[in-house]
Image: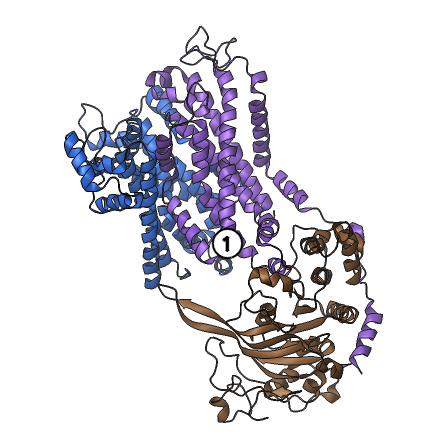
Chain colours: A purple, B brown, C blue
Amino acid sequence: MSLANIKHEDEARLGHVIPMVPESTIKEESYLQMVVRRFKKHKLAVIGLFVMIVLGLMAIFAPIIAPYDPYAINETFSAPPSPLHWLGTDQVGRDILSRLIYAARVSLMVGVGAVAISVAIGTILGLLSGYYGGKIDMVIMRLTDVFMSFPHLMLILVVVSVVGPSLTNVILVMGLLFWTGVARLVRGSVLQVKQLDYVKASIVLGLSTPRILFQHILPNVIAPILVNGTFGIAAAIIIEASLSFLGLGVQPPTASWGNMLTDAQSLTVLSSQPWIWVPPGLLIMLTVLSVNFIGDGLRDALDPKSIK
Amino acid sequence: MSNVAVEKREPLITVDGLKTYYPIKKGILSRTVGHIKAVDGVSFSIFEGETLGLVGESGCGKSTIGRSIVRLENPTEGKIFFQGDDITGLSNKQMSDYRSNLQIIFQDPFSSLNPRKRIKDIIAEPLKVHHIVPPKDIQKRVDELLDMVGLPKQYKNRYPHEFSGGQRQRIGIARALSLNPKLIVCDEPVSALDVSIQAQVLNLLSDLQKELNLTYLFIAHGLGAVKYISDRIAVMYLGKVVEIAKTEQIFKNPKHPYSLALLNAYPVPNPNFRNKERIVIQGDVPSPANPPKGCRFHTRCPIAMDICRHQVPELKGTDHAVACFAVN
Amino acid sequence: MFSYIIRRLLITIPIIFGVTIINFLIINMAPGNPVEMMIDPNLSQEDIEARKDALGLNAPLYVQYFNWLMNLLKGDLGFSMSTFEPVTQIISERLGPTILLMGTALFIGLFIAIPLGIISATKQYSKLDYFVTGGAFMGISIPNFFLGLGLIYIVSLQLNLLPTGGMVTLGGDNGLADRTLHLILPSVVLGIGIAGKKIRYVRSSVLETLGQDYLRTARAKGLREFIVINKHGLRNALIPIITVIGLEIPLLLGGAVIIEQIFQWPGIGQLTISSIMSRDYPTLMGLNLLAAVIVVSANLLTDIVYSLVDPRIKYE
């Protein structure tokens, strides 16, 4: 029996085109649909997302929603809540509700801005580190070790005090210092993905390195970046609030939830004018809690191991 | 089969004295304390239109050879020639001229396709990057390639996870074919598939070979798969080729005791033809970090002589080359 | 194992080196010259000029860095720009209260987190579990300055139970009871942040251990559930938790800055803020460097302890 005979027999028996399973049964939900379905199961994350959408709309439409100009000084100082000023006025007589609404812009801008910068830096460094390995990897990883050796808040405080406190500086400094976690995470994922045969196939197919990095490796490490970025937003919002609280972040008269609490360092305000410091504190907490819930929901939804 | 004609042609690819060592690092300063000798001096040629089967136990270095040919590994020593050109020391840029000629199909059909890309994009990407066809003809070419590997073109909008292992392997083949390669390294392309699917993929590969005049280096750990598709077979043991000959020679008249042992491990369907005196080799494969002196196989060889323990046998012979003192 | 520890120590050297470089670069961004800050400000103008020449202030940046590093190695961090005392002296005076605060906070954090995490894990998906996990989320989401202010408002001002700030009552007896009362609020606030993070960690560590086959074996042997969990499960679950305590140090140090400010706790956190306010860069740099050295040492210690406790640790 010759080789040719065997082949022809097989071909006749099995057919060249394998029968396909009918379209309806093979049709599976797309990756995105699966993530959405699993995210919806996390009730708190859905609530968190809803809160963030409301806060986002509040920030965007602040001029329409806010009852007063946040900088306008009214005749009454430190007035308790009243039908005229629902949440009262602050020590210079500005409407607290209006300032709270405008301050949402600051918090969201800081969270998104700082994380966007740090994720961009961390992703690129992590990709390079993981893909090339060797000396590049060594240098980048030692650099992250060095940056991770400073307590975040301490380093940011010192740098901000040197470059001067302002909204832009707070965003930039956080963005430039926060990338280490993302870089490590991306590097780890790249090390895993790069062992997979489809990356090797891309090399053999002669695809350029940037193409392999950004089109083949990056889309497959995006899940951990997304989760880490979400928790990063929460951290950035807290740090901005802390800096502003200490007077080293967003500078008055611009309203930030953090600097609205600054006055509560005086015992008089703390003890007898709670309407000045409780609402911004609660809003920071609500925002950070929502973002953390979203992050937790995303982690469950994106992690292939946590199938519930 | 036209083996006689094949031998007269120029070799498409020649591997000459290939060595691939991986350093073993240890200690405080990560000093290199030794080497894993994955491939340790291998030479062979593959002629145009031919299939060379490369067989050996896992860890013998057969995949490393395949990966070295497509430049996924950099050889420690030795040279690889493609149509007479030395491609060993080429930079990535210089190599890009040869990339399209040398392609590979992987063993695991589940990790060899990017899970985030649609089938049409997976196949179209190399066409775009290398400007194989004008942009307006890309989709047409994708359809043609899918048709060539026996997949209906309606499925091109799907993602890899919607396909079975055999179908994925076909997509991998279509992707490799997109660049019109001359040589395809088939790195155990059917070992991860069901037995019934194995035959289909093997048939597809051999049909494509005839149709497109392809050359294959077909890597497998057993003799079963390579028997039907190979013109010649090279048997490897611990980083060295121990025997290389035409397929029917290997099956009818294996000369190296290791080839004989491999053949005996291959199940014979008809009980009447079963070899009475089976050679079953004992023990495990020694570590490639510290291979035995002399003939690598002497520790497990049933006919080892004194000389085998001290001298390394060379691969001798033209049509049927064997590296064994008992034969030469 | 020994080789791993030596390697880990060797890796620390370039990190410390990098930390000093970053620190030096930040000083250079600040107004004024770092070497200038090293000079005793009590000297006359002529003397300062003479010392500038002697120190080679016109030398390139890397030479200046080298000089600064040499001084640093001698334990000379320069002089404070506001009190004119040596920085090392100022910092060492403030270190004690911060260590006391951080230590107590860590203890409180673990004291809350470990039992709650274990209960949460053993009663997974129960109401109690949801309550504890939700509480942990609150713990990590509430800004510590808001929690601090809230506790001062309720506990100190409304209920009049504890002092609002400071380490001792002014004009008081400075006794242990007085000190303890002052310590409670700030360390509880810091501890709650730690607890929030650690509860989730303890919970998942215990859950992972409870799913292991050897626990199923223990149950199959007929051991009572209490013994299964406490004798076979917890020991393996808690070892990693104890060993990664060191990783909380950066969080504690950052938190201390804010908490000490709110509670007027005379530690290095409050010193940081007052140095920032008075633009006292030499002190600030000393503090930043100290913080980094503490974190690096804590990481080093954590890794070493972990490698000693967990035999599976790789020599990578």
The answer to whether B192 appears left or right of C316 in the picture is right
Q: Residues within 10 Å of mark 1 (few under 14, many from 20)?
A: many
Residue C146 position within the rendered picture, expressed as x and y whole percent measured from the top left: 41, 27
Q: Is residue A306 visible?
A: no
- Give the residue at x 47% y 25%: A282
Residue situated furthest top in the rendering: A75
Residue B94 position within the rendered picture, expressed as x and y whole percent measured from the top left: 59, 62
Check the residue under mark 1 and report the chain it is in.
Answer: A
Q: Is residue B128 visible?
A: yes
Question: Which one is in front, C77 or C262?
Answer: C77
Quadrant placement of the N terminus of chain C: bottom left
Asked if A122 appears above or below B197 in the picture, the reply is above
The answer to whether A209 appears left or right of A142 in the picture is right
Residue C50 position within the rendered picture, expressed as x and y whole percent measured from the top left: 16, 36
- The residue wearing badge 1 is A130
Question: Which one is in front, C215 or A256?
Answer: A256
Quadrant placement of the C terminus of chain C: bottom left
Q: How many marks?
A: 1
Secondary element under disc 1, as helix, strand or loop, is: helix
The answer to whether C260 appears left or right of C234 in the picture is left
Question: Which one is in front, C215 or B174?
Answer: B174
- Give the residue at x 18% y 41%: C54
- Give the residue at x 81% y 61%: A19
- Give the residue at x 31% y 21%: C160
| Location of residue A52 (image quadrant) | top right
- The amino acid pointed to by label 1 is Gly
| Location of residue B252 (image quadrant) | bottom right
